[in-house]
Image: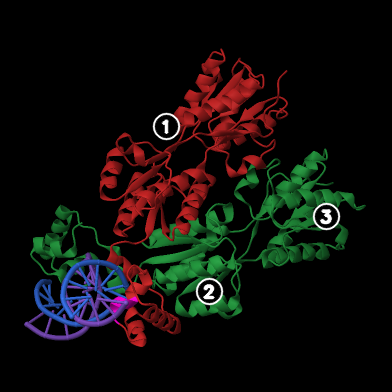
Chain colours: A green, B red, C blue, D purple
Amino acid sequence: MATIYEVSELAGVSLATVSRVMNNNAKVSEKTRTKVLDAMETLGYRPNAIAQSLASNRTNSVGVLVSELHGGFFGFIMDGIENELRLANKHIIITTGHSDEAQEKSAIEFLISRKCDALILLTDSVPDDYLISISKTIPTVLVNRKVERISENCISLNNEQGGYLATKALIENGHKHIAYIAGPDWKVDSHDRLLGHQRALKEHGISYQPELFFQGDFNEDTGFDGFNELTKAKLTFTALACGNDEMASGAMKAARKQGLDLPQDLSIVGFDNNMFASYLYPELTTVDNSAYLMGKMATDIILKSVYKQDDIAIKNVFEPKLVKRNSIKVLS
Amino acid sequence: MATIYEVSELAGVSLATVSRVMNNNAKVSEKTRTKVLDAMETLGYRPNAIAQSLASNRTNSVGVLVSELHGGFFGFIMDGIENELRLANKHIIITTGHSDEAQEKSAIEFLISRKCDALILLTDSVPDDYLISISKTIPTVLVNRKVERISENCISLNNEQGGYLATKALIENGHKHIAYIAGPDWKVDSHDRLLGHQRALKEHGISYQPELFFQGDFNEDTGFDGFNELTKAKLTFTALACGNDEMASGAMKAARKQGLDLPQDLSIVGFDNNMFASYLYPELTTVDNSAYLMGKMATDIILKSVYKQDDIAIKNVFEPKLVKRNSIKVLS
DNA sequence: TTGTAGGCGTTATCAC
DNA sequence: GTGATAACGCCTACAA
């Protein structure tokens, strides 16, 4: 592979000049510029990004940490990041942490040793302090997590409002007896969603019934089990709100297994607007989690702070929107 | 950030020695080794991967090109790649091509200029010749594509056999009148699947009826439209095979809209075993595309050829498996 | 506008 | 076993 040196020889100029036309940051006469360009062309020259990085102390890459590479949430976030980054001619190095503290830490260390210009982290297993110390070493933005002392570099969804919207949608369609299957309580996301649910109830004069609550873990089977548990209680309900779409799907399956007709006998709302939400039957009404936009915004923060792209508006918390489909029956 | 030089000073040894203990490739006395290790520890030294790459001409990274970052197929392939790579202490640089020739090419060029040690490409828009020439420059493995002259570096699924299995499952459950909604014919995948469908029919003495065929494009809506078109024909059918799960889902929606009860009035098989297949109602019987395994195998080829990991068995074509769920009714 | 030369942080080839 | 020292390919003052 040709180097800048060979190009300079062929073009009859110096190394520096070749470098200049590559980065067109300094004045180069049109004549020499084309000479150099031609030389590059005939040699099939491609700059060595590694060498550029070492010399310039900039890799034009941002390191990303996600839990898994598959799955709707991460997929859309990565999409948001990559699309935005590509437009800026930067690229993405992806690592996975599998929600394990040790793996997450080693992934982060790795990204740092790769000299990424910045980091975008989706992590729930690493402590705040660690993240704070990291962010002193390298520009870091956190998605779907809030850490007080670096809040201007955190992107998150207003989950409380999302939970509120979901339950409110049920109420506005005439439902008064509403069950809830929650995600794990230690996750702020699911905790906040539950809070929103409760606020919606309260605001509409409906008292919260512990018998209509089931603690799931965001996986489909706990939606299934949850529904079965809930129906064992003496309290009946016409609607069910779930902490996420997976559990909503599980609940739908359980309901159907019990012979219910959906949404005739039971209305359901999910949360996330996961890829498969529209594939469910009936198509699931849910709350969009703005995954793509959060990824995009995380990138924008970096574009602005690290790569000095101006006129970029930043917002740190996204307001969720209800996505209406066919899983809620209108009660008269 | 501390450099190897500072470490050598603190430890009272030379640069070379520090380098040796890092890569423990040469003999170093236990005494000096611990001296160096201690120095690294107290300095919080992290090797600069960029500098290592420049000097060693090895980046320990493999470049990956996919169409999109979201979506089940790519997600699982990337998962397969990343998991395998991480075990080998290598990492992944991901680019997207959006099924556009220019974008795919520029992504590939980019990966090359980043000096990736090898490439894993999922591409359908770039011509064979280009891929062949690329593979002369840098070790390359192609997933989900077959190029004759570099076939030993191609990983693919036996789509014909998959199509065969899907239709055979229908037939074995007593179905004789089987419609088919195909993916775009210019994609070998969907073409092969259709061939398999036809072979299954033929093998069981069922003649192929062009009236029972609809040409879709792998998107859900063409499954929807396809089903509606098929029911306009005079020929009736009790079962439907689809070129992929998306179209199967579309067909299910159309069928239900026409008032059919699934799988009572219509049996359906899909293809891919997409993430949402088990979320459909009824849960979709389909053919698994081995995405994860193909990603893993692509990585294995590289691990073996580039990173000299031995005792790795390579196989280039994967045999699909039927995933039985509840979308096929048994005809008596 | 263009050229010279030092430096980026390692690896690797020599000697000793 | 250990230490100089030249690469690696490019950037960037500083000079000219």
Same-subunit check for callouts 3 and 2: yes
Residue highlighted by disc 1: B188
Q: Residues within 10 Å of mark 1 (few under 14, many from 20)?
A: some
Q: Chain of mark 3?
A: A
Q: Residues within 10 Å of mark 3 (few under 14, many from 20)?
A: many
Mark 1: secondary structure: helix
| Quarter of the figure that contains the C terminus of chain B | top right
Residues drawn in magenta: B14-18
Relative to B235, is B16 above or below? Answer: below
Q: Chain of mark 1?
A: B
Residue name at image x 42 percent, y 32 percent: B188
Residue highlighted by disc 3: A178
Could you tell whether B329 is left or right of B218 in the image? right
Q: Is residue A24 visible?
A: no
Q: Amino acid at mark 3?
A: Ile
Badge number at residue A167:
none
Could you tell whether A185 is left or right of A137 in the image? right
Q: Earlier in the sequence, mark 3 or mark 2?
A: 2
| Quarter of the figure that contains the N terminus of chain B | bottom left
